[in-house]
Image (tube, rainbow, N blue to C red):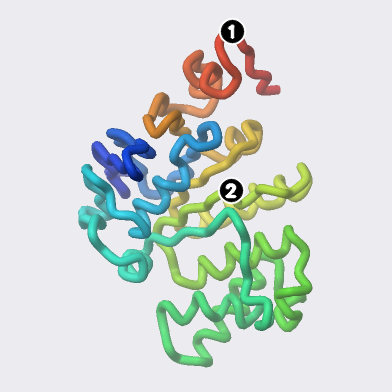
Amino acid sequence: MSGPFLHVASLSKSFKGLRAIYDVSFRIREGEILGLIGPNGAGKTTLFNLITGVFRPDGGKIEFLGQNLVGMAPHVICKLGVVRTFQLVKPFTHLSTLENVAVGCYNRTSDIQEVEERAWELLDFTGLAKKGLHPASSLTTPDRKRLELARALGTKPKLLLLDEVMAGLNPKEQGDIVELVHKIRDSGVTILIIEHHMRVIMGVSDRIIVLHHGVCIADGEPRAVCEDRGVIEAYLGKGAHLCLE
């Protein structure tokens, strides 16, 4: 890992006077899994929306591989290799699992045969090959999470932003997705991940940043961040203790 892959500097965003993100700065190194945590309403999803061009910041900069993303449309940012998933998984239920993944693959090519081959590869990679011809509406919640990842991977991301990809899963299912996230990173994709489960985020991340009321209050190794008094108080209040075992 070397140099800033993504560089966010002094980023701010308000909505009708309500400060959602304020003076946030951080860097992601290539090949890293960076965890993003914070209480509800901390500004995590807003930050994702700023990076991917859904919102335009009031101030600050977002540089990806040295290129300024501010002002670019989401589809242009996606073409550059910055891709995200969403908290609420919404497959195209009238399409098959294979066709859902193909939607993402068309971001890179219009060749039907190439799209189909790539889609099958991704279904195999994410453990969904046996359900490729099933309607997406028939998939379980864990499989829909895998489908969301496969569809995003179809766009050939360099940086993948995962928004609570493990929400609604039991511990066994969460562990399976953690393994898949590491597998995605090992394939050459850098990852920024939002997650509420402290044990999960500690297990999947190389480094963690913490947002609270739109401000970055911590940035460091998982254990150090989770033992930080300011982080514990942001989650649980003053005098609280956070059990990490």
Q: Residue at x 64, y 67 (%)?
A: 147
Residue in the foreground of this view, choosing between 89 and 191? 89
Which residue does the numbered mark 2 point to in the structure image?
164
Q: Residue at x 45, y 91 (%)?
A: 111
- Looking at the rendered image, the quarter that the C terminus falls into is top right
Expressed as whole percent of the image width and height from the top left, the position of residue 241 reads 63, 13
Residue 189: quarter of image: bottom left
User: Which residue is found at the position 65% from the left and 49% from the top?
Assistant: 166
Is any part of residue 168 visible from this angle?
A: yes
- Residue at the farthest bottom position: 112
Label 1 or label 2, whichever comes before in sequence order:
2
Residue 140 higher or lower than 203, as above or below: below
Q: Which mark is residue 179?
A: none
Label 1 sits on a secondary structure element that is loop
Residue 236 pos. (x, y %):
60, 19
Circle 2 SS class: loop
The image quadrant that residue 138 belongs to is: bottom right
Asked if the residue at tag 2 contacts the one at tag 1, i.e. Cβ–Cβ closer than 8 Å, the answer is no
Residue 146 at what x, y percent from top left? Answer: 65, 62
Give the residue type that dot 1 points to. Answer: Gly
Which residue is drawn at the image coordinates 26% and 63% (left, top)?
72
Q: Dot 1 corresponds to which residue?
A: 239
Q: Residue 71: name its quadrant.
A: bottom left
Quadrant of the frame with the N terminus: top left
**Is 70 above or below relative to 104?**
above
Q: Position of residue 93 (x, y in %)?
A: 68, 77
Q: Amino acid at mark 2?
A: Glu
Asked if one can make out residue 1 in the rendered structure from this viewpoint, the answer is no
Q: Nearer the viewer, mark 1 or mark 2?
A: 1
Relative to 72, is 97 on the left or the right? right
Q: CA distance from mark 1 to mark 2?
A: 28 Å
